[in-house]
Image: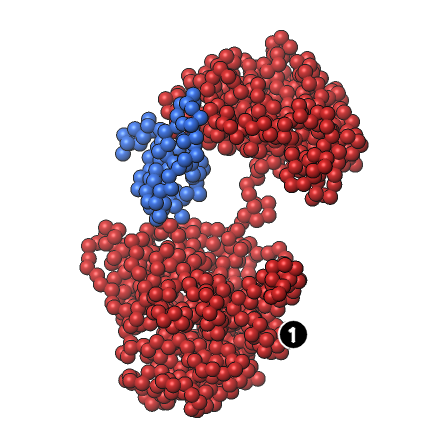
């Protein structure tokens, strides 16, 4: 069972979270071309090792998180809020 | 009947006699017995029939590795098949019976299969069901399929009751610093060491008693150990199996709470499924003794050596009088000594020639001898033995029991669950656990340590390593080297001797013989994974705990390789079977999933509502009067709405408060239609697309103030939309100053629909002026008060196509609102209407719901192209234009009428052209209802090309599942009042 250390709630089972997707995608602007959007939506790297992915603490504080997780061992290296302002709050509270 | 119980042995409580039944006959045992020990004590040798050949089978072991004594416990709805008699504790009134036999295990008619053996060899199923030449693949397959049910009946185990499980199960969770699996010397030493260093420790033992294999020792008493563990504050969990290890130090356990009690308290769960999160796991799961493959090595009376020691010293049962022990290692001699002291005549055959062992000469040792054939069928008559170098007939020993020890396999299963492959150890002829970076440490005989002092030392070393890892200490430690016998083991897996029609078993449970392994090799199934699946070696209840290594060694020999080169199959959870009941826990029946009700749920029921599940919600389905059926009721309700007025609970819609200075911009980005010019006091219907241009959801958003909106979503997509909005705001558009809050539970909503709806509301609001046509035009929104000073929000929104209002109050006022509205609606001969009438009304109007917006439909497919703004960009605006979504042959929303208006049809019907009724056709019907307004059945659905292409052509609705066909006419989806004159009234 994956355990995610939510910066707001503390360490919780993954059953409290919903998986989002690749956290490294820079979604293009809304008026960008079909090609740019196709690239952003459909093309994904199949990473062996650590990858950044988004998780939603859907049964908790509802924060969207960037989780650095190994696809091989499920080891989690880091967890931080997606929103930069929330990141700052978390860091200031450390 | 003679008993095999002997005095002065065992840890059973002879003052407490328990009666139990075996195959409907009554017997007696003692408290502390297992079913197996009680059966043995009562001299019952045959306890089952084998899987394929229906050979008589006895008890092979004294633990979880048992592959012969699988029995059925209990009766009726508490019948539990395939229970290992060796781990089932005896209780008063226990009912047990043999399996896979007719009429019974002693006399089984299907025993004939034993002589048809050559037809039931490895791959039997694969070959049979592919057909036998010349019948393969063609009609032959069907012929053989016909026989399947007979074959399945003949081969197998016990059968489930087929009745609902009357017992309850529960899920439980715990946390600790260290969990120790196994309470043998190593596990106990590790637990004590850790608790003394102030760690929070849980000690898990699958047996009812702690002690591990020490329970097979005559002078072992666990009470002192137990006291010590308890005094140190260690949580001891007996009758609990750690069946699997998972990521992040999570252990799955099954606690058998009442399986050993005759009349358990009904308020206690039968079993408890534990999830324990630890910082570290120490596994001292022990080792399992292997048997040896030779002819007829499955005759009742064959057992592992260690098992007989258990039966003697723990249960006071001497399992044989004239015992031959066959071995290749030192571990049997203490047992041989004890058995002979207890009165048995013991001979040890040791395959080794050069070794020294100290004994008191109370038994004979035949150095360099092996067994090669057992004579007997239902019991052992004698054993043929031979010199180990060349197997030939040399001598026959009369005996009633043959005990086997082909070496020991450390229980590396739990480590294997984590993907850690064990490594082969030549010196000890076994797989040993490999090192892992995970927080798992193997101790005791599960790391190949054969003597007690080494086991204890390894337990302490294990805990020291844990303390170091946790940063509590920095102490050097070392683990003792694997092994510990005075003389080396001599690998011995099979004694080969060709004798016609004899069988030499590798895996007892599925009747896998040495010949099956050779057949698999001949037919090319040489990888261990193929070998397993082709022969079923290592499958089923015991998962090959005893036989796997033998199978591997045979394949290694055939391939001229060493065992590690052949590999080992991966052990997967569970270590021992886990009941489905325990997995589901309390999530059964109406607790299968959460249940959501609206605040006026009881009000609805009190007013005659029949309820229906919509997602997790219970919603009113219809409100029958007297003897009305569902269709009587919904047709009346829908007609009443069109004629006067109806009231419908719509609380289950998702409701989201959207607040902040950038709220308008936010809505303008997520909806396909424009929201930038929506005035305060107005609502707008909107469609959201996904990134890929497909419709996600639809709903309305009400502008309550400059920077505040109230959004409604569909019932089914409410949670998804909420998460989606949060994702956008927290990950993509972090510069937008918007806050979204789910207020679904906070507001109770009702739709008041029909030509008289305004009149009804006039009587219900404080100030009827606010809802006049001028003040509250179509799509107008107002915040006002219901009578009794109840704050409310009203929007003039219509899903039915009639003049209609949605009224929301705080959930606490739901019942008051319903009383007020209903009292006034009755004055206009109004009705309460449910989901079925709601559906009829919206289908008549061609409004789409989840039935249409199924995740494949674009905004154009749904005929809502006008809802896609051309003046702005929004989520999905680029992707909705991609080629595949713009094809001419996409299925477009249309309405359907039957050509013969009296005919009916169903949702799910496939739309086809008249002369081409096949496959997926050219469209599908998604919703069907009787239209009270039109007086016949109508449908909504999709057809390639839409109305323009088919408006003059009759199509066929094919319903192969219900074996129906109907001629259909394609019409506009807006089947009544297409101009919407009623809504604007």
Instruction: Give neighbour class at mark 1: few <14, some 14-19, many 20+ (Cα, 10 Å).
Output: few
- x%, y% of residue B362? 36, 89
Vertical placement of residue B500 versus B583, above or below: below
Seen at 34% across and 87% down, the residue is B367
Q: Is residue B880 above or below residue B222?
A: above
Q: Position of residue B889 (x, y in %)?
A: 60, 30
What's the residue at 61%, 12% (across, down)? Answer: B776
- Secondary structure, mark 1, is loop
Q: Residue furthest front?
A: B134
Q: What residue would you read off at disc 1?
A: B103
Task: State the residue in front, B353 or B76.
Answer: B353
Please tell me the colour of chain B. Answer: red
Instruction: Return the x and y of residue B245 as percentages of the image width and height.
Output: 39, 55
Q: Residue furthest top?
A: B774
**Residue located 54% across and 24% down the image:** B687
Q: Disc 1 is attached to a residue of which chain?
A: B
In the depicted view, which residue is nearer to us: B930 or B254? Answer: B930
Q: Quadrant of the C terminus of chain B?
A: top right
Q: How many labels sit on residues?
A: 1
Whole-percent x and y of residue B132? 60, 66
Q: Quadrant of residue B127?
A: bottom right
Q: Which of the pair B604/B136 is nearer the observer?
A: B136
Name the colour assigned to chain A in the rendering: blue
**Residue B146 against residue B632 in the figure, above or below:** below
Taking depth in this image into account, of B88 and B141 the one nearest to the observer is: B141
**A25 sits to left or right of B3:** left
Residue at 54% x, 13% y is B681
């Amino acid at each position: 069972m994956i355990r995610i250390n939510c910066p707001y709630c503390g360490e919780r089972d993954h059953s409290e979270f919903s998986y989002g997707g690749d956290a490294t995608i820079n979604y293009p602007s809304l008026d960008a071309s079909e090609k740019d959007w196709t690239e952003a939506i459909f093309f994904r790297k199949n990473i062996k090792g650590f990858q950044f992915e988004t998780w939603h603490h859907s049964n908790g504080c509802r924060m969207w998180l960037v989780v650095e997780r190994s696809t091989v061992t499920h080891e989690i290296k880091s967890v931080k809020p997606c929103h930069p302002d929330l990141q700052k709050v978390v860091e200031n509270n450390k | 009947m003679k008993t095999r119980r002997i005095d002065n042995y065992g840890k059973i409580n002879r003052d407490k006699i328990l009666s139990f039944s075996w195959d409907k006959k009554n017997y007696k045992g003692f408290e502390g017995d297992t079913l197996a020990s009680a059966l043995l004590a009562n001299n019952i040798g045959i306890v089952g029939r084998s899987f394929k050949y229906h050979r008589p089978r006895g008890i092979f072991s004294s633990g979880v590795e048992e592959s012969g004594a699988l029995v059925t416990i209990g009766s009726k709805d508490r019948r539990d098949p395939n229970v290992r008699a060796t781990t089932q504790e005896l209780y008063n009134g226990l009912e047990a019976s043999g399996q896979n036999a007719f009429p019974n295990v002693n006399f089984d008619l299907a025993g004939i299969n034993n002589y048809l053996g050559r037809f039931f060899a490895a791959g039997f199923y694969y070959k049979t069901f592919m057909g036998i030449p010349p019948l393969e693949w063609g009609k032959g397959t069907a012929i053989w399929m016909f026989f399947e049910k007979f074959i399945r009946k003949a081969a197998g185990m016990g059968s489930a009751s087929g009745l609902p499980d009357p017992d309850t199960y529960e899920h439980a969770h715990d946390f600790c610093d260290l969990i120790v699996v196994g309470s043998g010397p190593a596990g106990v030493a590790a637990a004590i060491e850790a608790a003394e260093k102030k760690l929070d420790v849980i000690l898990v033992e699958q047996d009812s008693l702690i002690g591990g294999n020490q329970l097979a020792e005559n002078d072992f008493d666990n009470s002192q150990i137990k006291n010590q563990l308890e005094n140190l504050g260690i949580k001891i969990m007996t009758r609990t199996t750690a069946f699997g290890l998972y990521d992040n130090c999570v252990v799955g356990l099954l606690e058998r709470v009442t399986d050993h009690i005759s009349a358990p308290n009904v308020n206690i769960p039968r079993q408890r499924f534990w999830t324990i999160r630890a910082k570290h796991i120490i596994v001292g799961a022990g080792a399992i003794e292997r048997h040896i493959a030779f002819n007829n090595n499955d005759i009742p009376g064959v057992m592992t050596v260690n098992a007989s020691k258990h039966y003697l010293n723990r249960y006071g049962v001497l399992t044989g009088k004239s015992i031959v022990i066959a071995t290749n290692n030192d571990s049997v001699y203490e047992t041989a000594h004890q058995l002979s002291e207890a009165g048995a005549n013991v001979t040890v055959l040791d395959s080794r020639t050069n070794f020294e062992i100290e004994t008191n000469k109370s038994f004979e040792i035949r150095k360099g001898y092996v067994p090669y054939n057992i004579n007997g069928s239902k019991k052992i008559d004698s054993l043929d033995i031979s010199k180990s170098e060349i197997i030939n007939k040399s001598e026959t020993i009369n005996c009633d029991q043959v005990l086997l020890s082909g070496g020991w396999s450390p229980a590396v299963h739990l480590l294997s669950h984590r993907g850690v492959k064990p490594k082969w150890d030549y010196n000890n002829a076994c797989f040993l656990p490999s090192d892992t970076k995970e927080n798992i440490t193997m101790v005791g005989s599960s790391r190949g340590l054969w003597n007690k002092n080494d086991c204890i030392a390894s337990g302490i070393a294990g805990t020291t390593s844990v303390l170091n890892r946790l940063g509590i200490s920095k102490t050097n430690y070392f683990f003792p080297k694997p092994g510990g016998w005075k003389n080396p083991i001599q690998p011995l897996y099979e004694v080969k001797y060709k004798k016609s029609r004899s069988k030499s078993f590798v895996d007892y449970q599925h009747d896998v013989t040495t010949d099956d392994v050779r057949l698999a090799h001949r037919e090319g199934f040489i990888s261990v994974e193929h070998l397993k699946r082709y022969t079923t070696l290592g499958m089923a209840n015991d998962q090959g705990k005893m036989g796997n290594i033998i199978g591997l060694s045979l394949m290694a020999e055939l391939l001229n390789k060493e065992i590690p080169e052949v590999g080992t199959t991966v052990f997967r959870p569970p270590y021992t079977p886990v009941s489905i009941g325990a997995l589901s826990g309390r999530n059964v029946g109406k607790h299968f999933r959460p249940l959501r009700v609206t605040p006026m749920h009881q009000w609805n029921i009190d007013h005659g509502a029949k309820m229906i599940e919509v997602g997790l919600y219970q919603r009113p389905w219809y409100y029958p009067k007297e003897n009305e059926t569902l269709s009587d009721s919904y047709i009346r309700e829908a007609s009443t709405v069109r004629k006067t007025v109806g009231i419908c609970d719509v609380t289950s819609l998702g409701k989201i408060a959207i607040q902040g200075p950038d709220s308008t911009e936010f809505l303008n980005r997520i909806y396909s239609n424009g929201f930038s010019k929506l005035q305060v006091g107005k609502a707008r219907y909107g469609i959201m697309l996904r990134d890929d241009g497909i419709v996600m959801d639809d709903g309305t958003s009400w502008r309550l103030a400059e920077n505040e909106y109230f959004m409604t979503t569909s019932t089914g997509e409410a949670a998804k939309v909420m998460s989606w909005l949060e994702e956008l705001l927290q990950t993509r558009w972090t510069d937008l100053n918007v806050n979204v809050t789910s207020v679904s539970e906070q507001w109770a909503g009702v739709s008041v629909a029909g030509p008289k709806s305004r009149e009804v509301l006039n009587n219900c609001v404080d100030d009827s002026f606010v809802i006049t046509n001028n003040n509250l035009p179509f799509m107008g929104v107002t915040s006002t008060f219901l009578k009794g000073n109840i704050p409310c929000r009203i929007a003039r929104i219509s899903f039915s196509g009639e003049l209609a209002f949605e009224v929301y109050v705080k959930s606490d006022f739901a019942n008051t609102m319903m009383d007020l509205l209903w009292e006034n609606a009755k004055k206009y001969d109004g009705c309460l209407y449910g989901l079925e009438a709601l559906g009829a009304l919206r289908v008549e109007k061609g409004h789409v719901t989840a039935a249409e917006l199924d995740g494949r439909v674009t905004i154009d497919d749904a005929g809502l192209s006008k809802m896609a703004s051309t003046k702005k960009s929004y989520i999905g605006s680029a992707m909705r234009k991609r080629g595949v979504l713009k094809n001419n042959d996409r299925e477009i929303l249309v309405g359907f009428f039957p050509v013969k208006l009296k005919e009916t049809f169903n949702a799910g019907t496939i739309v086809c052209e008249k002369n081409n009724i096949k496959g997926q056709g050219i469209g599908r019907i998604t919703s069907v209802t009787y239209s009270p307004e039109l007086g016949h059945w109508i449908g909504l659905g999709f057809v390639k090309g839409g109305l323009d292409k088919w408006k003059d052509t009759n199509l066929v609705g094919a319903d192969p599942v219900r074996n129906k066909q109907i001629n259909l006419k394609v019409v506009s989806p807006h089947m009544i009042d297409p101009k919407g004159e009623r809504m604007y009234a």
